[in-house]
């Protein structure tokens, strides 16, 4: 009984996500669902992305957080359209929330829409929002055992950005081990090592976004 209910919820979400995506396709907008644990660097990456690609691509962001509009304010300050969703406790965004938030954006003016999901390494990977691709960040300081412990997000993502490489001298985690385990879970995952603090390695991320 419980299993059937969960399956129904996921199927209803998948249907709505497909509608969102069809709507984005009609408008010529490519959509990325960006996921990570809290603090891995999603908003910092988006601030950098707006600064680097804002002139060649019209970028909008939907921000998901349990509370506050701090991240949407950061993105607006960086110079892109942003709208904030507060889930008031829910640990992920779903397609319904994205359909409502998208109405608040001037979609006609966008080419790339990034959905910054709620910080959580588990639930966001289970719910489509209407994206063309999922991308994830794991920061080095979170530890190199995380792909093995939380495989679903690594399995679902097209790209893994290993962030905070500037911290490599100070933490014991190995980026090689993260990459090796992530590739075992998902052989086609693209892995980018970067630092959103120094900007090192971000060319790979911009290249991926351009090719989306
Ligand atoms: N040292 C270092 N700190 C970073 C890097 N990227 C982000 N941070 C910091 O990590 C914290 C969380 O970043 P934020 O972008 O808000 O993470 P989010 O919760 O995933 O959106 C902030 O204090 C950032 O300045 C990085 O590459 N290196
Ligand atoms: Mg954030």
Image (cartoon, rainbow, N blue to C red):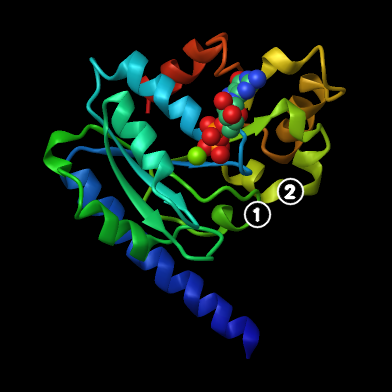
Whole-percent x, y for residue 115 in the image: 40, 44
Whole-percent x, y for residue 76 in the image: 29, 33
Identify the residue at image location x=60%, y=16%. 195
Count residues near mark 1 (Cα–Cα under 10 Å), then give few for <14, some for 14-19, many for 20+.
some
Left or right: 81 in relation to 63: left
Q: State whether residue 83 appears in this view.
A: yes
Nearer the N terminus, badge 1 or badge 2?
A: 1
Disc assigned to residue 150? 2
**Residue denoted by label 1:** 122
**Quarter of the image containing the N terminus?**
bottom right
Left or right: 185 in relation to 90: right
Check contact, mark 1 vs mark 2: CB within 8 A.
yes
Mark 1 CB lies closer than 8 A to ligand 1: no
Q: CA distance from mark 1 to mark 2?
A: 7 Å
Identify the residue at image location x=19%, y=55%. 103
Is the residue 79 above or below the residue 18 in the image? above
Whole-percent x, y for residue 46 in the image: 42, 28
Identify the residue at image location x=56%, y=11%. 201
């Amino acid at each position: 009984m419980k299993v059937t209910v969960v399956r129904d919820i996921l199927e209803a979400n998948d249907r709505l996500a497909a509608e969102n995506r069809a709507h984005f396709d009609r408008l010529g907008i490519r959509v990325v669902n960006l996921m990570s644990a809290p603090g891995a660097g999603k908003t910092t990456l988006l601030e950098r992305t707006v600064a680097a690609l804002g002139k060649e691509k019209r970028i909008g962001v939907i921000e998901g957080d349990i509370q506050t509009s701090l991240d949407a304010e950061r993105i607006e300050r960086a110079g892109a359209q942003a709208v904030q969703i507060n889930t008031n406790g829910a640990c992920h965004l779903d397609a319904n929330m994205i359909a409502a938030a998208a109405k608040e954006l001037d979609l006609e003016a966008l080419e790339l829409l990034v959905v910054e999901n709620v910080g959580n390494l588990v639930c966001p990977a289970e719910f489509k929002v209407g994206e063309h691709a999922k991308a994830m960040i794991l920061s080095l300081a979170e530890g190199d055992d995380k792909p093995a412990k939380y495989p679903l997000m690594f399995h679902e993502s097209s790209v893994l950005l290993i962030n905070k490489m500037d911290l490599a001298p100070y933490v014991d985690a190995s980026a090689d081990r993260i990459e090796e385990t992530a590739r075992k879970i998902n052989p086609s995952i693209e892995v980018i090592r970067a630092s959103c603090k120094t900007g090192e390695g971000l060319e790979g991320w911009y290249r991926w976004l351009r090719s989306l």
